[in-house]
Each structure stands twice: as C-alpha cells, then as structure tokens.
Image (cartoon, grey):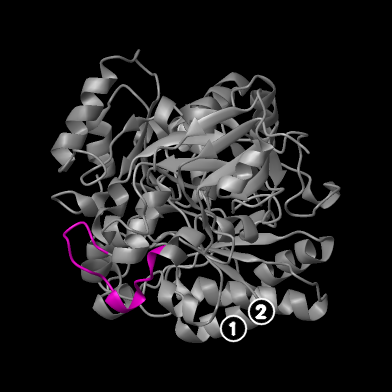
Amino acid sequence: MIKATEIYYNGNIITMDGKKSTATHLAVKGDTILAVGHAEVLQYKNEETACIDLRGKTMLPGFYDGHSHLMRAGQQYLYFLDLSPYPLGTLRSLQDTAQKIKEHSKTKQKGEWIICGGFDETSIREARHYTLRELDEIAPEHPLVIRHISGHILLANSLAYRLANITENTPDPAGGRYQRDEQGNFTGIVEEPVAMEPFFQKGLPMTEEKWQKAVEHASSIYVSKGVTTAQDGNVTQSMWDSFFKAHEKNMLKCRVQLLPRFPLGYMDLDNFGNTKPGTQLTKDKYISLGAVKLIQDGSLQAYTGYLSKPYHKMIYHGLPHDSWTGYPTRSRESLMELVLKFHKQGWQIAIHGNGDNAIEDIIAAFEHAQQKYPRHDVRHIIIHCQTVREDQLDRMQKAKLIPSFFVTHTYFWGDRHKNIFLGKERAERINPLQSALRRNIPFTLHNDTYVTPIDPLFSVWSAVNRKTASGEILGEEQQIDVYNALKAVTIWGAYQFHEEKIKGSLEKGKLADFVILDKNPLETPKETIKDIAVLAAVIGGKCVFGML
C-alpha cells in the first residue's frame, strides 16, 4: 500500500466535492492528495509519515482567484505612491491627497517622475478630479501621473504630457481618449489603457528585475489570504517572460494562470502554438495557460463603462450631463472579428465588460463565433459582468458563458453606484449572483487586485451580505448562501479555467492545495465571515504561509 508523506487529522475538512462532503482526515503523498475521509485514512501512515493535528480548525481547498492582475498588483505596491481614500485608505480630500504627493516629492530629484495609484474622486469630499492647473501646482518640478483606482483613467500634469510626447495635436487612440475641454485644451484626464500606456512606458519603465520583484511581493500577499492559484489577467510579452524567470528563482509563491493580453500584448498570438486553456506550462504545475484577454469597455466609476441608458448623475467636467452612456473599446463588428479569429484558433476568450451595452456586444460576439465554428465546452468568460440584465443572463445560460463577478463593488462603490453612477434600480442589480444561480450558471468571484486588495473571504462576505461601506444592504434579493459563495472561490474558479480535474476541491488525485482557517465559514455568523483568519496555506503539500 502507498504510504502518505503527511496526514492531517482532527480537522473540519470541507471538501467542496459537489456532494457537500466533509471529513476529519486527509492524506498527502508528495504534491497530491492520497485520501480524504475519517479514521480509515490512518491506514496510509507509517513511521516516516508526518502527522499534523488540525485541532478542530477548518480546511478548505486553496482559494482560486477568479480574476486579478498579480504582477501589476506587485508593481503598484512596490513602485506607486498610494493615494487610496477611505474606506481603502485614509485620505478624505483633495487637500489631503495633494499634501501626501508634495511630501513624497521631497524624496525625489528634480525632474524625477512621481507615479501614484488608488485615487478615487468619488470617495473624497470634493467629489471631483484635479484640474490640469492644480496638477501642475502640486508637482511643478516633476512629471506627475495619478492612476485612478479603476485602472481605466489617469491624471497627468503638463510636464508628464510633454515627456510622454502627447501634444494637443495627438489624436485619440481607438478605444481611449485624451480628454479636452471646449477649447481643445487637455483637462489632465486620460481615459483607458491604450491612451494611458505612453505615460507608464516613459514614467515607470519596468525592467525584468522589477517585474520579478513584483511577482515575489504580490504572490506573498496572495498566499497570506489563502490564494493558492492566482491569475494575471493582462499579460504582455515582457511580463510573460518575467513570470517564468521569477519561478525559476523561487520568487513565485503561488500557482498562477496567465492570460495573454490583446491588443497591447506585444505577443504573437496568431502563432502561439498550444492554445488549450488549462495547459500546464511548468512541470510542477505552478504556471498554466488561460484565456486571451480582451477589453470592451471601461469602468463605471470612471464613466467609461458602456451602458444602454445614461449614467444617473454626472459629477465632473468634460462629459455631457444628460445623455452620457460611456463608450465601447471597439465597435461590435470589430469585436466579432477578433472573437471569431481567436475562437477559431482554439483559444478560450475572456472579455472585460462592465456596462450592459458592452455585455451585449460580448454576448453577440460569442454567439456569432459559436454559430460559425461550433466548439464543445469552450467556457468563454465575461469579466466583471457588472450590470448584466436578466435577458442577457438567459442568453449566457444558453451559450454556456461564465461570468466572473467583481462582487465587492457592493461594498467599495455600492453607495456611489446607487447615488451617482446608476441610481437605485440598476445599482441593486449589480453583480446579480442569485439570478445566475437560478439559471444554474457557474460563476466566480474576484477582487480585481490591484484595484482592491486580494481577499477571497471578503468576496464571500460581500456575496452573502451585499453590504455597502455605509452599512446598507444593496439588492437583498441577490444575496446568496455561503456554500455557493465558497464554490465561486474554489471549484468554480478551477472550472472556469479548465483546471477542475486537478484543483478546486479536496479529492483523491488532485493537487494538495488547501487553506486552513481559524473558523468554519459555514457555521460562523455571516456578518463576520470577512474576519475569519487564514492560519496557513499549503501548495503541493508544502506550507507556503503560516504554521501547521
């Protein structure tokens, strides 16, 4: 009989195996689960087996990140000045924010770039962006770039525009905008990644060493929150190479699935070779291949999400005040062509869509591709899927599309979606988890880190409670039960990216990836789920965080 290298006993083991099975014992052989059950598991013990007493603590499959940007999270944490307002940070006004930038500028040489992140004008007292004149006054001797918390706009001062070679005569790129006033002058606001890219290329050139340090830093944070498989949902060629080199140096602390970025990917996706999602790219299964990542609109918080009906209120200059619905990254026809090409090549495709008009474009493109070139079990993904309508969910069910919901929107921006961006009726339906459940649509939950901190248990708490930062319940009818919320950060996460045969549940033959919690989320009052502590994380049978 095969003997275990480790046996965990005296635990409360929630297997997430589809049968709601629980266990007290789990045996591991190397990096693989050997057996799950009760006292009978001890038959795999010999004198060399390490026996770990769980002391009644709860074991779950390691959390599977539904969507985030691991490497860019590390980049922001290491190299950006944090301007996060309450409740993510402490800043509450434009004055507070400006003072922090000015103090930081004292540590810089004249002419050195200042790169900031986390700014959110809707969370501060004045509820507006800085003007270009104000930006120039804050950092007169430095090119200044402030990335919005959404990641879909930035603010730049005049010196940053000049050094990035963006002039008044520079045309707006397709899918982005250098916002101008009525006289054609820059306002300081730059919309969408395609327009933002020149500022970061000039202001924060990322070397291979910097990217690798970003991987190490971010993945250490991920495992501390119980994430054993992370995602990087927007990988360029240089990032792709840096992931593998970081892994060779043991700097990658968790498993990660890589989603090649298009169109700013600088990767030859047409001649990529193996396009099968879930393909393991390293022998130890630490890096795997995901879907091609596309973007069809921006962010509701940045007024660049593409809606079918106008935004509820407009709170800053530069946009129409009665009919603005945002805009798509590309036309529906262009999206259809791209999706058809990648679908035909065998790729899984994941498309960012927040507004219901963007979601309409995405669904239509997926339906068109499947009609032209039918494929079995594709699992194309709509990332965020924030304002998806009931009629659209019906079509998603029929097309077997998977939504990945950024459900913590209900906490971080729920009050503002209700009062500013969407109005009460639409806001109460953001991230409609219960509507998806009624249709038996599997879905995942995510934090979109770097946008908000990685924390799957906070996503579970948000899915179950739907509380806003002010304590209101936003859309009670869309609350779901704890068990299904846990599925959305474990087995459905693995299913979304074709890895359910090796990850997502605690079953014989699967990878020994699990998390130990100090409390059982199925028995804890639902209001306190976000406060459950991660005691340890284990990947491939090895403890990578905490103590056992």
Badge 2: residue crowd in 10 Å (few <14, some 14–19, many ≥20): some
Quadrant containing the N terminus in the rendered view: top right
* Horizontal and vertical percent position of residue 297: 50, 63
Q: Mark 2 = which residue?
A: 399
Q: Give residue 504's mark.
A: none
Q: Say whether marks 1 and 2 touch (CB < 8 Å).
A: yes
Inspect the magenta stretch and tell me whether residue 481 lies in it: yes
Q: Which of 502 and 291 is in front in this view?
A: 502
The residue beneath circle 1 is: 395
- Report the span colored magenta: 467-482
The residue closer to the viewer here, 352 or 14, is: 14
Residue positioned 46% across, 84% down in the render: 390
Q: In this view, does 373 lie above or below 34?
A: below
- Where is residue 27 shown, x and y percent of the image? 62, 40
Mark 1 to mark 2 CA distance (whole Å): 6 Å
- Would you say 23 lies left or right of 113 here? right
User: Callout 2, which amino acid?
Assistant: Ala
Q: Badge 1: how crowded within 10 Å, few (<14), some, or many (20+)?
A: some
Closer to us: 69 or 332: 69
Q: What residue type is labelled 1?
A: Arg
User: Residue 35 location in percent, x, y?
Assistant: 66, 46
Percent x, y of residue 220 = 48, 29
Is residue 90 in view from this perspective? yes
Work out whether residue 370 or residue 116 is closer to the camera in this orientation and state it.
370
Secondary structure mostly seen in the magenta stretch: loop
| Labels in figure, total | 2
